[in-house]
Image (cartoon, rainbow, N blue to C red):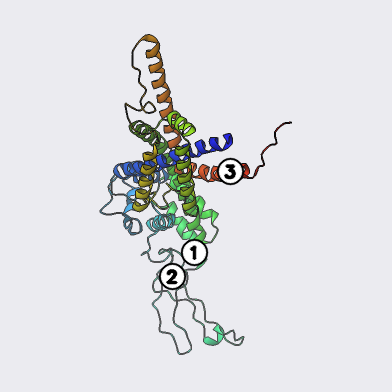
Amino acid sequence: MFGSSVLDVAIGLVFLYLLLSLLCTSINEFIESLLKNRSKDLERGLRELLGDPQGTGLVQKLYQHPLISSLFPNDYKPGGTNLPSYMPSRQFALALLDIVRPANAMGWGTPPPPAPTEPGPNQTQPRPRHQVSGAAFMTTPGVAEPIASPAADAGDPGATPAPPTPGVSTADIIPDLRHAVANNGQLGDGVKRAVLTLIDAAGNDVNQVLQNLEGWYDGAMNRVSEWYRQRTRWISLAVGFVLTVVINADTFAVAKSLSRDQALRTTITSSAQLYAESHARAPAPGVAQEAGSQPTSPKGMKELVNEFNDVHEVGWPLGWDRDDRRKVPRSSQFSPPQWDRFVAEWVLKFFGWVITAIAISLGAPFWFDILNRISPLRSSAKSTQQNSPEKPANA
């Protein structure tokens, strides 16, 4: 019985931390919607990545590119509040290459193409030649591929292939792109060196160039994400402590009430297990699936608050009540011994708040995982107690 009671108290505390962490996450998301920290961090990361501290050079051209400007309303202004909080790596790579080598340029450093000719009766229509994942990598306008007869396309060994037509070959794309990067005045020396290294590492594969640029961008965004996580930890700790004091969520008082009140303990643990089972196949609560998305839906948060209120009505010692010794320490007299005890009780309550605030800062996914791990232990402990035979009396 003792082991089961300890597990019930632990489950009750974990469930409390989970509920408060979800509430803290919603408050953090509201603060984020006001401060726009994600978009500011993204812009700061791009400025460092592209060597544009003021955001008036290459970063400005990147945000003004149609592939990027479609992600946010209005025009780009350095430090603006309308900037996107998320930028796909593919769009970044394509936009950067298009800035370095515009898509409407005539070819890849080749001479002007000859005028197109009408195909003969045994010739096929010209078709695109070097189309890959990117608007910039297209066949030179007006340049036709070598035209072969249908017999040659069918593999007839007697067919004579058409002579090659001057144009852009695959081998010309990478050198031309490398030349464009090396002679681009918008790129700083550090950015040129990085981009040229990525181009050289791709060999003659244009798609690999895009993938290398995407990896370069993703590495920078990992650093940006760490900035956000570090700041969020401190914000969560501050919000968690304020929330803890406002609702008077004292870990020591809650643990004492759960250990002494079996009805309260049973109600809370049952609610915790039902919550864990209902979310077993869903993503961990409090985790945003996409940039800017809320951790829980409005309906789910309403149900969560209702459940929290139902448990609170049972007698969970939360809130402020001068007549409830569990919530507010008090002393009928202020003689020195009792005054010392009064101060000691408040000091203990303060540390109870601190423990709760630190627990909240760990996040809802952490406590949801803990709840899923210890809930089966409670069921196992109860089944063991029910199946264990009574010990025979000593003769």
Which residue is the site of mark 3?
A: 382
Disc 1 is placed on an element classified as helix
Q: Are marks 2 and 3 in contact (CB under 8 Å)?
A: no
Which quadrant does the N terminus fall into?
A: top right
Q: Is residue 384 above or below residue 109?
A: above
Q: Earlier in the sequence, mark 1 or mark 3?
A: 1
Residue at the (41%, 63%) spot, across then down:
136
Judge the density around disc 1: few (<14), some (14-19), many (≥20) Cα neighbours within 10 Å: some
CA–CA distance in space, label 1 to label 3: 74 Å
| Side (left or right) of 389 relative to 344 | right
Residue nearest the observer in this picture, 357 or 77? 357
The picture places residue 248, in percent across and down from the top left corner, at 36, 31
Residue at the (47%, 86%) spot, across then down:
123
Disc 2 is placed on an element classified as loop
Which residue is the site of mark 2?
A: 139
Which residue is the site of mark 1?
A: 172
Residue nearest the observer in this picture, 152 or 376? 376
